[in-house]
Amino acid sequence: MAETAATPALGIDRLSRPPESQLRLAWRSFRRNRLAVAGGVVLLLLYVVALFAPVLAPYDYRAFNPGQPLKPPSAQHWMGTDRQTRDVFSRVLVGSRVSLAVGFAAVSLIMLIGITLGAVAGYLGGVVDNVIMRLTDIMLAIPLLFLLIAAAALFTPGIRTTVIVIGFTSWMTTARLVRGEFLRLKALDYVLAARALGASTPRIMARHLLPNALPAIIVQATLWLSYAILLESSLSFLGLGVQPPTPSWGNMLADGRVDMRIGWWVAVFPGMAIFVTVLAFNLVGDGLRDAFDPWRRER
Amino acid sequence: MTPASRAYIVRRIVLLPFLLVGLSIVVFALIHLAPGDPALAFISEQAMDPELVEQVRRNLGLDKPLPVQYAVWASHVIRLDFGTAYTFNRTPVIDLIRERLGVTVQLQGLALLVALALAIPIGVISAQRRYSLFDHTTTVGVLLGLALPNFWIALLLQLLFAVKLGWLPAFGSGADAHGLQKVAHYVMPVTVLATTVLPIFVRFMRSSMLDVISQEYVRTARAKGLPERAVIYGHALRNALIPMVTVVGNQLAGLLSGSVIVEYIFGWPGLGSLAYESILRRDYPVILALTLLAGSFILIVNVLVDIVYALIDPRISFD
């Protein structure tokens, strides 16, 4: 009531359009990007499939079909069967749960570590910044897969180890990005104003800097979701990630590699699932980046 | 060279030893992350004999405080003494690495050359004919390429060219092969490694070229009537290539990661497969040496890249 009464008093506001929030502008730009929207639709479908995988799967992913090892794709088994006579299609569906969940958990950990270190380095500066950033340089210099397999081998392999290992070896680019954003933002006048008003350092970081760094962080997180899924499948393919009998796309590929001469389908379909998922995340990530950053839209 | 860029180069060089020490601390910390008795964590069940456990304890100096342990370990490492491997017939680690270095350097070098030889012309033509069919095809190709898992391409290539068509050998580095047969062994591993960096190079080359083409000196070159070829290759390309130095430097670590997968799938006896084998055997001296050497290599290359970059492009300012 009070708001509707106040508006006519200003008069001029009725003529000009109300200012749109950054989020709305970004959403409008994202919606116009057909590739990004297509990627988003694919992702939505993937999550629905992952959620209802046990219901959607025509067979139990653990069930054996006696006498049918390595049968090629058919009306009965859309993606054929593997050496142990299990239905590959059902396993790919259930595998989506593992791959998406591991990806999501790993990226949460990457963001937690990366944002914390980046924010502290960017805002505090000085020695702290130097130490954190040199650690970042060092970690980035070690080829990721060397670091990943070395770390994975230290612990009992499994889903939890995979998440932790990816999280602790992949936070560096996020830390750099967040540091850059915080460095840029903390020099702006509104932060000075907040400090002059007596806001504490944690409050300035959480309430004034972080929200403005969010667009860059969201883009980074989306792109890392695709990398994390690739890393998980690489680790599982090498036998150091998610362990059978839990199906993940990576360990299914490792299974299929052994039987490639007899049955190509066991390796080809899980790989295709990884490819489509990673592609979809990349398209959405690129779309978000362009949407949040008008300067890049031209490219 | 401006004083600013000279100061920058000096700073980078002075910082390098500190980064190397930091790297060794990170790698050392990795050992001590293992839960339980570290001595036992580093020995595979097959190799569990008391003498070996003693050797591990001696190597790691596990009875001493951590800083002392680090100092002892570092004093050996600085002389490239990484001890002897627990498996691999107890070969000294540095000899193992020396044996296998050549294979990896060959594959990496070839992959880099192939990727650059393709990426530069593709990027230039894409930028030159922006929004053409060629450019759109390139953009789509880059998107698809970035999403391709390297182990999947490797398996698909093996399936098609080795299993179905029988044109290329599926396995091995062809140590005994000669001539064309030897070349055939290189085709698939190099292709897979190259495709991991190709999309990144193409995307960067295209945008770098687009940046340069819109500069005024390019317009001036056109305005004074230079033929288009001279404008593109004489003026634009040279400057567009400069930032590529950094991109190539940044991708080296990624290429080395790729060697783990590629050497494993194609059965090449290089450093990547050595890393993987030593992990499976829990042969920690080997994996630590590899991680440390690979990291040092990348740190040193990055400094060199920065120096080259500062030398060839005087416009860059450092602060």
Image (tube, coloured by chain):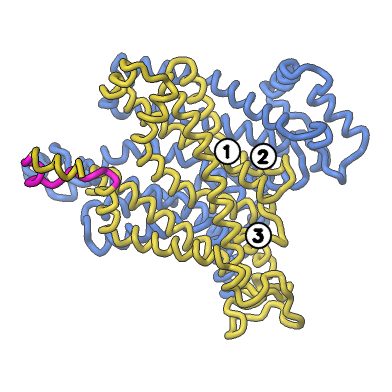
> Disc 3 sits on a residue from what chain?
A
| Residue A172 coordinates in the image, percent (x, y) | 50, 35
Task: Look at 6% across and 41% down and name the residue there.
Answer: A11
Q: Which residue is mark 2?
A: A151
Q: Secondary structure at mark 3?
A: helix
Q: Quadrant of residue B226?
A: top left
Earlier in the chain: of badge 2 and badge 3, it is 2
What residue did someone put label 1 on?
A169
Q: Residue furthest front?
A: A1
Type of amino acid under label 1 = Thr
Q: Which range is magenta?
A: A11-23
Local packing at callout 1 (Cα closer than 10 Å; few below 14, some 14-19, many 20+) is some
Depth check, front residue: B58 or A16: A16
Identify residue for label 3: A251
Identify the chain of the residue marked 2, using the numbered disc in the image: A
Q: Which chain is blue?
A: B
Name the amino acid type tagged 2: Ala
**Alpha carbon distance from label 2 to label 3:** 18 Å
Residue at image coords 55%, 32%? A139
Q: Secondary structure at mark 2?
A: helix
Whichever of callouts 3 and 1 sits on the residue coming sooner in the sequence is 1
Q: Main secondary structure of the magenta part?
A: loop
Along the polypeptide, which appears first: circle 1 or circle 2?
2
Q: Secondary structure at mark 1?
A: helix
Give the vertical position of B317 relative to A219 (above or below): above
Gap in angstroms between the C-alphas marked 3 and 1: 21 Å
Q: In the figure, is residue B218 to the left or right of B196?
A: left
Residue B282 x, y percent position in the rendering? 77, 42
